Image (cartoon, rainbow, N blue to C red):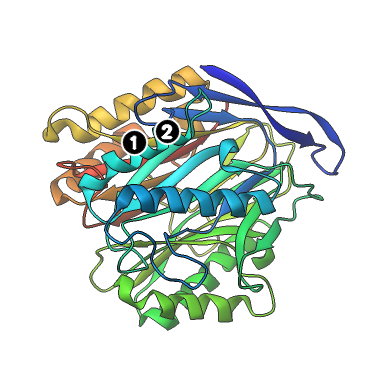
């Protein structure tokens, strides 16, 4: 792995005193794509952003029809937002990219190759579909190392143009809980509120609260009604600052929205670095956990994995890649934290459902969300998997 020491300082786990430079390791940085296969990062403050679109300060689209210029504009906006949180795009460890059409991914990767010329390239995951602005061709959110000072396990929010909404929230260098996607089948607005209530109820099981939420990702349909979800989220958080939110359009008849969450948690002296939890009155699944908690140690952001051989072998090919990555980075199947499965081909989904029971230990599967989307951000591919892992 390529090893770098970023400018961020590692605070004391429960204080604010700086100790040493943070270590970030990049697995197989690719100069052609501007991405690493995976990025391993120390327990340092990590900035999580909202989803950024290629729009100006008035909300007007930039460079209509030009995906390269739109990507450049989004990266400029991301960098500016991260700098308010004592970070920068140069310190990104993960980029999540949504593209309107699968053939646009190559142009976006070409821009990333120019933007990240050295070995310090982030992990990158692509997905696709309609974006929150009808003329946007690309949208990006990021996770980046931050120099922000944090106190205890409380996240730090940095509002954007709207002082009630966080453009960037910093996860302290303590612990983290990943909440699997939760959903409700009522109308979009009420379903959003009910789903957020479910998330808070689930994390209360671990002694956490609404204000500990660092980031939300909402899978919803149709994207044309995204403002309804935004209003419901704002009303739910009331006088609290709304954490950064990312939106992905999914295809799920009868379910208008599913939401997953990243939640700050105290460091714990648990023997295992990763533990898995099922809240009371919740059904346990052998292929995903409701909550996955990283108590301490480094974490691994894996680039979106996609089959490289025949369509019939796409799922087994992806998991072969994952096994190679977790072996090389010092993780294991029992330390996977969060999986997001995006599929556009029902046959790929069927292969995933058949494969997972034999792959995961039924006691330690990662928290997970699975979303059917119009495409997975790559031409002629039917499934991609986005994974975060802890260390042994």
Q: Pointer 2 and pointer 1: residues touching (CB < 8 Å)?
A: yes
Write down the residue under mark 1.
110
Residue plotted at (47% across, 71% down): 195
Residue plotted at (41% across, 37% down): 112
Marks 2/1: CA distance? 7 Å
Secondary structure of residue under mark 2: helix
Label at residue 214:
none
Relative placement, left or right, of 363 versus 318 is right
> Is residue 208 visible in this depiction of the protein?
no
| Relative to 205, residue 97 above or below | above
Residue nearest the observer in this picture, 158 or 193 = 158
Please state the horizontal and vertical placement of residue 172, each as a whole percent of the image: 71, 47
Q: Residues within 10 Å of mark 2 (few under 14, many from 20)?
A: few
> Is residue 58 visible in this depiction of the protein?
yes
Look at the image and tell me in which quarter the C terminus lies.
top right
Residue plotted at (62% across, 75% down): 237
Secondary structure of residue under mark 1: helix
Residue nearest the observer in this picture, 193 or 344 = 344
Please state the horizontal and vertical placement of residue 63, each as a whole percent of the image: 35, 59
Please state the horizontal and vertical placement of residue 161, each as a whole percent of the image: 61, 69
| Relative to 310, residue 330 above or below | above
Write down the residue under mark 2.
114
């Amino acid at each position: 792995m390529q090893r770098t020491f970023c400018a961020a300082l590692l605070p004391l786990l429960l204080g604010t005193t700086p100790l040493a430079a943070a270590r970030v390791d990049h697995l197989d940085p690719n100069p052609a794509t501007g991405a690493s296969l995976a990025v391993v990062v120390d327990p340092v403050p990590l900035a999580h952003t909202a989803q950024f679109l290629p729009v100006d300060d008035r909300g007007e689209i930039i460079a209509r029809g030009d995906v390269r210029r739109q990507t450049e504009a989004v990266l400029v906006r991301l960098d500016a937002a991260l700098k308010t949180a004592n970070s920068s795009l140069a310190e990104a460890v993960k980029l999540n990219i949504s593209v309107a059409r699968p053939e646009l991914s190559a142009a976006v990767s070409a821009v990333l190759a120019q933007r990240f010329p050295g070995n310090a390239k982030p992990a990158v995951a692509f997905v696709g579909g309609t974006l929150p602005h009808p003329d946007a061709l690309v949208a990006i959110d990021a996770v980046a190392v931050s120099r922000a000072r944090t106190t205890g396990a409380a996240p730090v929010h940095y509002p954007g143009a709207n002082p009630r909404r966080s453009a960037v929230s910093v996860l302290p260098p303590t612990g983290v809980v990943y909440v699997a996607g939760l959903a409700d089948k009522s109308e979009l607005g009420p379903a959003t509120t009910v789903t957020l209530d479910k998330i808070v109820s689930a994390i209360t099981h671990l002694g956490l609260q609404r204000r500990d939420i660092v980031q939300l990702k909402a899978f919803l349909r149709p994207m044309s009604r995204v403002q309804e979800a935004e209003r419901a989220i704002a009303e739910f958080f009331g006088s609290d600052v709304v954490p950064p939110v990312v939106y992905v359009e999914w295809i799920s008849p009868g379910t208008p929205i599913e939401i997953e969450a990243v939640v700050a948690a105290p460091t714990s002296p648990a023997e295992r670095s990763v533990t898995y939890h099922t809240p009371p009155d919740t059904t346990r699944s052998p292929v995903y956990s409701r909550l996955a908690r990283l108590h301490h140690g480094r974490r691994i952001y894996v680039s979106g994995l996609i089959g490289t051989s025949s369509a019939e072998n796409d799922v087994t090919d992806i998991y072969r890649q994952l096994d190679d990555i977790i072996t090389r980075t010092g993780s294991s199947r029992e330390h996977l934290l969060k999986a997001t499965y995006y599929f556009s081909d029902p046959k790929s989904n069927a292969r995933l459902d058949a494969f997972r029971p034999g792959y995961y230990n039924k006691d330690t599967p990662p928290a997970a969300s699975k979303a059917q989307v119009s495409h997975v951000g790559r031409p002629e591919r039917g499934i991609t998997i986005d994974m975060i892992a802890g260390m042994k």
